[in-house]
Image (tube, rainbow, N blue to C red):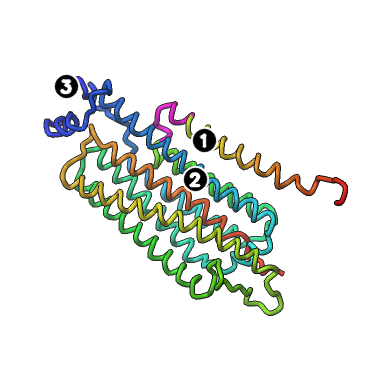
Amino acid sequence: MATSSEIQTAERSFQHHFASIEQQRDTATFGMWMFLLTEIMFFGGLFCSYLVYRRTYYEAFVEGSQKMNIILGAVNTAVLICSSLSMAMGVRAAQTGKPKLMVILLLVTILFGFGFLGIKAVEYHEHWVNHEFPGPNFHFETGDPAHPATDPLHTQIYFGLYWSMTGLHALHMIIGIGLVTWLVLAGMRGAFSPIYYSPVENVGLYWHFVDLVWIYLFPLLYLISHKHSG
Amino acid sequence: MKIIPHDDEYTHVIPPSLYVGIWATLMVLTLITVLASFAELGIFNIVLALLIATIKGTLVVLFFMHLRYSPKLTMVAVIASVCFLLILFSLTMTDYLSRHWATFPGR
């Protein structure tokens, strides 16, 4: 049964225009899903341009993708999956009324989030110093004298999509870390209980969505083809 | 307390073992997708990569995001959104895939 302090927390968070706290929670979660569906469309535009250009300049995309560090990409995928597990367990801790455990699991999630961004920064640095950033300083060679680049201009499109898709994803990660930090601070004040934990649930949805985007980005950008083009 | 649900079952709580199982499956699928990309399968490289990514995504949405235990309204909205995205992709490709079909004077 709910303790009296849990009921107090719930009553403070209850808005009078809802029939019950359950309805309030379902409404908040549905609203979060609606936001995430607009996010699908947001990323969808980039995925669609990826589809069009990859189809048109496939060889240039293959050459560009040879510059990706597959090991770092795969490790980052694993880091994000681990962060999703700790996030899901953190939401569960909030559902089952274990605020201390929730705070610990959310801190672990933040740690994984920073781990992801750190690895991403190493990759970005590598691409930056190799002139693999679209613009006036862009310079591309396959590194194999027998097979010169088919069309560096089109490989630039690959890198343009690489930087914008992973960059938009990284921006979502940064926002996610900010939101989870807010949950940690609110959780330490005892803001959540098994009756009222909508912010935890909904930030969790956001975090898993960002993980979901990376699940598609990783194979599409890193694993196009390993054959040395030519 | 009228705002508090009458029973103890406020919400569906997923057992930790299921979360860990999903996590392990996602890790194994990540390994498979990396290994599969080293095999030369032609067109099936991308088909396999997207198939694995979609299985992973479905697991994340159903269990980590609790869609399996959500109201039907949420399920319908999510499925509709995915279908809508595919419709937009298809309509875009009707243009790009059919451009070279066009024959007209001067071409």
Q: Residues within 10 Å of mark 1 (few under 14, many from 20)?
A: some
Q: Residue at x 46, y 40 (%)?
A: A38
Q: Main secondary structure of the magenta part?
A: helix
For the residues bearing labels 2 and 3, Cβ distance under 8 angstroms:
no
Q: Are marks 1 and 2 on the same chain?
A: no
Would you identify the image quadrant in which residue A170 lies?
A: bottom left
Residue type, mark 2 in image: Phe
Q: Looking at the image, is A34 positioned above or below residue A224?
A: above
Q: Which residue, given by chain and number where applicable, does mark 2 sit on?
A: A42
Nearer to us of marks 1 and 2 is 2
Segment colored magenta:
B67-76
Magenta stretch encompasses residue B75: yes
Subunit ID for the residue under disc 3: B
CA gap, disc 1 and disc 2: 12 Å
Q: Residue at x 64, y 60 (%)?
A: B39
Q: Which residue, given by chain and number where applicable, does mark 1 sit on?
A: B81
* Residue closest to the eye, A184 or A40: A40
Residue A163 in the image: x percent, y percent? 51, 61
Magenta stretch encompasses residue A80: no
Q: Secondary structure at mark 2?
A: helix
Would you identify the image quadrant in which residue A17 lies?
A: top left
Residue B98 in the image: x percent, y percent? 75, 45
Extreme front residue here? Answer: B106
Extreme left residue here? Answer: A4
